[in-house]
Amino acid sequence: MSASSFLGLLVNNPAVILMVGALMCIATPRHLASLIMLAATALSATKLYSMGLGEYGTIMVFGETLTTVRIDALSRLFVIVFHIAIALNIIYAWGGRDRAQNFATLGYPAAAVGGVLAGDYITLFIWWEIAAITSVFLVWAPGTRATYVAGMRYLAIQVLSGVLLLGGIVLIFRETGSLEFNLIGLRDADGAIKFSALVIFLAFGIKSAFPLLHNWVQDAYPKSTISGTIILSVFTTKLAVYSLARGFAGTTELIYIGAVMTIFPIFFALIENDLRKVLTYSINNQVGFMVVGIGIGTAGALNGAVGYAFCNIIFESLLFMSIGAAMFRTGTSKATELGGLYRTMPITMMFCLVGALSISAFPFFAGFVTKGLIVDGAAEAHMFWIWLTLLFASAGVLEHAGIKIPYFTFFAHDSGKRPKEAPLGMLIAMGISAVLSIGIGIYPEPLYALLPHQEQIADYKPYTAYHIIEQLQLLLWAVLAFAVLILIKWYPPEVPSVNLDTDWFYRVPGRGLVLWAAGASRATWNATWRVLSDQIQNVMGRIYAVHGPEGQLARSWPIGFMALWTSVVLALVLILSFLA
Amino acid sequence: MSDDNQHGHEKGWADNPIFIRGFLGALIISAVAAAAAGFNPAWQNPHHHFTGEHMPGFFATLWRLATPVFFAIYGFAAFAFIVLAGQHLRKLVARKEDYYDERE
C-alpha cells in the first residue's frame, strides 16, 4: 500500500479524526483543549455525514480484506449518539486543564466510534483495546492510591476482554476463513454451542457487564472525576451492546442474561448510599433491557434495543451530569450528605427531574418511545415471565433512578447545604440533554428513521391510548407506593456503608491469595538463596584457607593470586579443549 | 452535616404543607384516573398477548377481572416489594465505609 493511500485511509476515518484531536490536546496550550476537542468532534461528524452509508477504507493485510469503516443503519445510530455524547461531555467539562483527562475525554470515545465502525474483527479488536487503555486514564484522573489500584483492576478486566476477543477471532477465522464482523450466533445448525462464538460472547459479555461480570463498572466508574464518570458511563457498555446486536441478535441466552441484569442491580441500587454508584447499577439495569431486546431478536425488539441505547445514553448522562453538578458544588455524592438542594440549585433539579422522568419511561419522554418496543417484543413473542420481569424492572428503575436520585439530592431531609447553581458549561450540557430527552419523547420520528428495521417501525405507534394508560398505571401506582411508604415511615433511611458485590472476591480473598502466593514465592526464593549462598561461602572459605594471606600457597599475596589464576586459566583451557 | 451553615434550615417551597398536600392530591387523582381509564374497552389493548386462558379456573377469572387495572396493581406491588424486601440485602452485604481501605 502506498503512503498516500494509507494517509487517505486515516483521514477518511472519523475515529482517527477524533483521535488526532485527542492527541493535539496533549501538545497544545491547555486553555485551547476544549475548543480543539469540540472542533475535532464537529469535523468527525461532518465527515460521517458527507460519507453516508457504505463501506470505506478497505485494506489488504496478509491477503485478508479489512473494512476499517462500515456505516450501515446499525452503526450509524450508535456513532450519531456517540458524537452527541462526546459534544455534551466536552461542554460539560469546559475548560478542564488536566492534559491526561482531556486526552481521554476524546481519545476514549474515539476508540468506541472506531469499534462501532469496524467492519472486520481485526479493526474491532484494535479499537476495543485502545478503548480499554485510553479509558483507564479517566479512572486514574483523581490521582489517589485508591483510584490507581481501581484503575489497575479495571485495566486487567478490560484487557482480559480484549484477549478473549482476540482468541475468539483466531478460532472463528480458523473455522470460517473470514474476518468480516457479522452475525455470529452462539449455536451451530445442530444447536450445539460453538466454542469460538462462546469466547467472543464472553468478551462482549465482560464489556457489557453481564451478571457476575458486572462489578468492574461499580468498582471503577464512581472513583473517576466528576466529568470522567459521565464519559465512562457512555461508551464501553454501549460499544458492547452494539457488538452484541451485530454478532448475537436473536441469541436466546441473551434474553435470560438480560432479564437477570434488569433485576439484581435494582436491589443493590436501593441500598447504595453513593448516588453515582446507584447510577452505575442503573447502567447494568438499563443495558439489561437492551440485552433482552437483542436476545428476542425480532425486528421490533431489535429496534427497541438499539433505539433504547440511543435514548439511554442521553438521559443516563443527564442524570450523571446533575449528580455531578451537585457533587461539584458540595463535594459529595452521598445521599446521607445531600438533600434539600432544590432551594439553591433549581435549574439542575429541573434537569435531573427530566432525566428521571425519561429513564422511568413516562409518556412524552425519551424512554417511553423506545422501551415500549422491547416490552412489546417480549409480549409478542409470548414470553410471559420475561414480560413480567421487564415490568417489574421498570418499577425498579422508577425506584432507584426515577425517585431516589432526584429525591435524596434535591429534596428529602435538608442537609443545610446552600451551594450555588451549577456552572454555565454544566447547565448548557444538561439543558441540551433535557431538550433532547423531551424532544425525542414528543417527536420520536427522526429517531425512528434511524432504526435498522424500517419495515417494522413504520407500523409502530407509541402513543396509542392503551400504551399510555398501561404505562401511567404502572408508574403512577408505583409512585403512590413510594408516597405511602414515606408517609408510614417504612421507606428505609439511607445509611453510610460500603456494600459488598462480586468485586469483593478479587479485592479481599483474591488479593489475599495473590499476596500469599507472592509471599510464598519470596520465601522459597530466600530459602534457596540461603542454601546456595551458604555453599558458595563454604567453597570460598576453603579457597581462602589455601590461597588467602594465611594459606599454604600464599606466603605472599602475588604468589597466591598467581596460583589461583593459573588454576582458573588451566581449567578454562581444559574445558575449551574438550569442547574443541 | 453542616448545621453551622450560615443559611440555616429555612423552609423552601417543597417543604410547604400546601405544596405537599397538593402534590399528593394530584398524584392520587391521576393514579385513580389512570386505573379508571383501564376499564374503557375502547382504550384497551386490542390484541392482548396474555389472556390467562391456560391458567387454572380460579386464576383465569382473577386474571380477567384484574386485567383493566393489572398494571396499576403490579406497579404498586412491585415497588413495595422492591423497597420492603430489598432493604434486607443490607444485612448481607453492608459493611463500614472504610471496609476496603483497611484491606487494600
Image: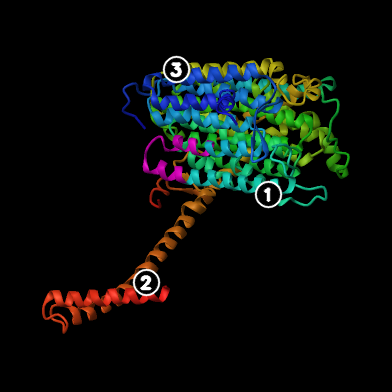
Colour convention of the picture: rainbow
Precedes in sequence: disc 2 or disc 1 = 1
Q: Which residue is mark 1?
A: A171
Residues indicated by labels 3 and 1 sit on the same polypeptide chain = yes
Q: Is residue A137 magenta?
A: yes
Q: CA distance from mark 3 to mark 2?
A: 60 Å
Of residues A201 and A298, the one drawn nearer to the viewer in this rendering: A201
Q: Chain of mark 3?
A: A
Q: Marks 3/1: CA distance?
A: 44 Å
Magenta span: predominant SS is helix
User: Which span of residues is magenta-colored?
Assistant: A131-152
In which quadrant will I find the C terminus of chain A? bottom left
Which labelled disc corresponds to residue A528? 2
How much space separates mark 2 and mark 1, taking CA atoms? 42 Å
Crowding around mark 2 (Cα neighbors within 10 Å: few <14, some 14 to 19, many 20+) is few
Task: Tell me the element at label 1.
Answer: helix
Tags 2 and 1 on a common chain: yes
Q: Is residue A498 magenta?
A: no
Marked residue nearer the N-terminal end (3 or 1) = 3
Left or right: where A345 falls relative to A294: left
- Residue B92 lies, in percent from the top left, at 53, 51
Q: Is label 3 in contact with label 1 (beta carbons under 8 Å)? A: no
Amino acid of disc 2: Thr
Amino acid type, label 1: Leu
Q: Which mark is residue A35?
A: 3
Residues at marks 2 and 1 touching, judged by CB atoms closer than 8 Å = no
Up the image or down, A502 lies above or below B6; here it is below
Where residue A14 appears, x then y in whole percent? Answer: 58, 24
Tell me the amino acid under the disc marked 3.
Leu
Q: Specify the label residue A321 is tagged with.
A: none
Q: Secondary structure at mark 3?
A: helix
